[in-house]
Image (cartoon, rainbow, N blue to C red):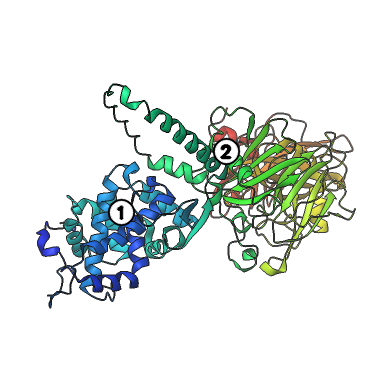
Amino acid sequence: MQSHDTFPSTDISSAAPPRPSRNDAEAALVEHYPRLVRLAHLILPPALGRHRRVLAAHALVQKSLAAAAPSRPGPTPAPTVPAQRGEPGPVLVWLRQGVVSAALRAASRPRWSLGRTPLPTVMGLRLFPRAGSDDELALESRLATMTPDARAAFALRVLEGLTAQSAALLLTAAGVPTPDEALHAAERLRTTVGTDAESLLHGAEFDPCTVQARPTDLLRRRHRKRFTALVAAVLLVASTTAVLTLRPEPPTPPTPSPPVTALAAAATRATDPGLLLRTPADRWSDTARVDLTQWPARGTRTGDTALLSRALHAWAQSTGDRPGVRVSVTPGTPTTPPAAPARLLFAGTVDGSTIVLLHDGGRIIRYAEPSTGRGGAVLELARADDSDVTTGAAVAVSRTRLGARFLLAPWIDESAVRDLLRPDVPARRLAVSVDGVTDPVPEAPGDCRRLPALQVRSSTRIVEDHSFLLADLGELSPAHLTWSPAPGTGAPARQPREATSAAGLAAWARTACALPGLRGTGVRAVNRWEFARQALPERAGRATWTCTRAENWDGHGRVTVAWEGEDAHSRPVRVPGPAREDTAACSRFGQHLLAGTYWTAPSGARYFLAAGSRAVTTVTARGPVSATVRGQVLAVRTNADGQVRLTGTVPGSGELRGWEEAERYSGGP
């Protein structure tokens, strides 16, 4: 029989700890003040707002002394609720129960009535805890959806380390009608968060004693002073005639505003520029996670709160009607508004526009507005989840007729521009500003006369000292270009490698003209795989069979199979095949390939050629051409025409169908 925890309904009086003297209570309060305030802050509703929630937590803890005895009582027995984790004894237990009870009562009152206590009082400033890590923010969002009783149970079990029975007794004494339900909800969240729950609750996001201070709206404050003086003058005049008026009917009390939902509270936090995450400048050089989360905030406008606020609100309203803001979304990118504070990457002026770059863990957000204030703003959303050293190395900040400027990652030491169509021409050094913004990289013309690409080198400080190519496809993140050499070249079969070697650059010079066709399609990386080489009949040279895979951020890939002759200036001939985007072909999960095509020799003779990847051991052709050979390549002289059905043998994987047949056998048209 499956067992489960139960929490018995215990008599409240049996769970009540003895009341200490005021001196003892004050001494324990001073010693454990941060612990008790953190507990109250965690139970109070997040919808209260960060400033009022901090002050309310401090007020509840300070008011707990009022219930202490005025004089020291005599010896008292040990409390029923046991002390744990080295607690000093019954005094802290009594204080903790009082704080929990007061916080739960406060959480049940209307939001507008909270925080109305004489002390502490802060005027002219707003206080709020420092922004925590992404995991802390995620936990705060989960807690905002729970009831105060469940939050109290979670705090007692994780933060205070109480057993289930002790927590049930304390909750019962605090007036929780169903402590078992609250504890079960807390346990579900605790299981979801895992072993990091305690360390997260001790983080900056949940620390109301280490706070940041920001001024309130200074301009609004001046207006309020003037308005108050005017109202006082009007009231003084009105009071002289008040006795001549009839007594009015009592006014109808205003209807209290409905409580703000957890979703609305999260949205408010997400659009608060003071909560934007900012990575320390040198963290990238000492971390095992080198990606966009390690970019520091750069630019001359990172402290411009008004600019950051406009960018965040434009993003929050990107799915609705936002006058004056043009929204552009890369295919496959979610358009949901921000759910938590994002990370600030850049804020500054580039090419006459004021730019803000943000990263929310899965997307890059670019906000641009004219520096002159004339004209509309632009908001761009692009997917950037699971970025790494290469795919998180550059982000486009500006595009003009001179080209595109990129903000480079802090781990990029060298940058240059090279023409992919001219592999023998050295790369030209690219100047970079102190903020990491490059000079313009020219855009490729439409006639494929040149194809500029970024060639960058990463820093030795991250032990990733290597150069790699990035191609601008008109999106926020340039595409990473790699290649896989053909078998028989002495290179072992392994993952795609960087295309900055002489052989890699020469290979990409044959394929580069296909890159403009990928513009604006959400491409993350493009790999050119030379899966076979074949000696042509009649000593006509050697042919190279290639598979080029353009991988999107969502994992889908566009695949093109082509046949290339020996002439470096000839264009590749595409082999007809599937047009699907959701395919594993030519990836690490689709490492076997077989394709064929007709070819006419210089003598005029017609041949059917076929080739398979390195694991293929036999190739069979059926239909207009019928032949079987051992090995990876096939060449048959024929005068026939029409589609040839190809099959190959891969040891351990069974039969491999030809590329031309793949769509028909997978249910395509």
Residue 634 can be seen, yes or no: no
Q: Give whichever of discs 1 and 2 has the lower sequence position.
A: 1
- Rendering quarter of residue 261: top left
Residue drawn at the location 75% of the way across and 63% of the way down: 490
Horizontal arrangement in the rendering, residue 102 relative to residue 112 (left or right): left
Alpha carbon separation for disc pair 1 and 2 = 31 Å
Q: Position of residue 348 (x, y in %)?
A: 71, 48
Q: Position of residue 624 (x, y in %)?
A: 69, 31
- Decide which of 154, 118 is in the foreground and name it: 118
- Dot 1 lies on which element? helix
Horizontal arrangement in the rendering, residue 329 relative to residue 257 (left or right): right
The residue under label 2 is which amino acid type? Trp
- Dot 2 lies on which element? helix
The residue under label 1 is which amino acid type? Arg
Q: Which residue is mark 2?
A: 315
Q: Position of residue 397 (x, y in %)?
A: 72, 45
Q: Which residue is mark 1?
A: 151
- Pointer 1 and pointer 2: residues touching (CB < 8 Å)? no
State whether residue 266 is above or below residue 374.
below
State whether residue 512 is above or below residue 496.
above
Horizontal arrangement in the rendering, residue 110 relative to residue 333 (left or right): left
